[in-house]
Amino acid sequence: MQYSAIDHDYMVYVEKNEKIMDTLTKFCKEKEILNAQLSGIGAVKAIELGAYDLGNREYTRQYFDDAWELVSYQGNVTLKEDKPFIHAHITISNHDMNTRGGHLFEAKVAVVGEFFFAHGR
């Protein structure tokens, strides 16, 4: 992971084969980011997505092993049990331009992952 500061915000570059959610959560802890809005793009693989089933009160999960384009990553940072917690939803697209989306549990960067933290201290 690499990053650059832009005023009070950050551009974070998650590197190839790094886990996105794990890496971004560690970054929040390191920089003491307790709330923020996130957005991102890139290429991802080993993706675990979910959709919340209200009736069963649990997530339906689906796993995508191949590389997909990360068309959109939208999330926020809040506190959960006094620690930074990232809640993110993504849209991904394959080489046939078919899209999927949902709650992101985890994914690895396939080529590049660029994420912007807007937290305006």
Image: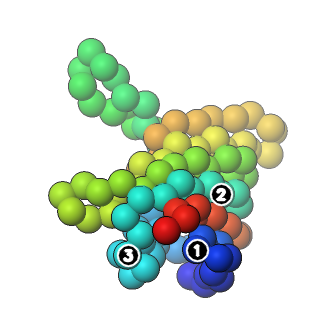
Q: CA distance from mark 2 to mark 3?
A: 20 Å
- Tag 1 secondary structure: loop
Q: CA distance from mark 2 to mark 1?
A: 17 Å
Residue contact at pointers 2 and 3, CB within 8 angstroms: no
Mark 1 crowdedness (10 Å alpha carbons): few <14, some 14-19, many ≥20: few
Q: Which residue is mark 2?
A: 40
Residue nearest the viewer, comparing 99 with 85:
85
Answer with left or right where residue 84 lies relative to residue 101: left
The way the protein has been coloured in the rendering is rainbow
Q: What residue sits right under mark 3 in the picture? A: 32
Question: Is residue 119 among the parts visible in the rendering?
Answer: yes
Q: Which mark sits nearer the N-terminus, 3 or 1?
A: 1
Provide residue 99's location: percent of width, then percent of height. 69, 35
The label nearer to you, 3 versus 1, is 1
Q: Of 39 and 57, which appears nearest the observer? A: 39
Give the mark nearer the N terminus: 2 vs 3: 3
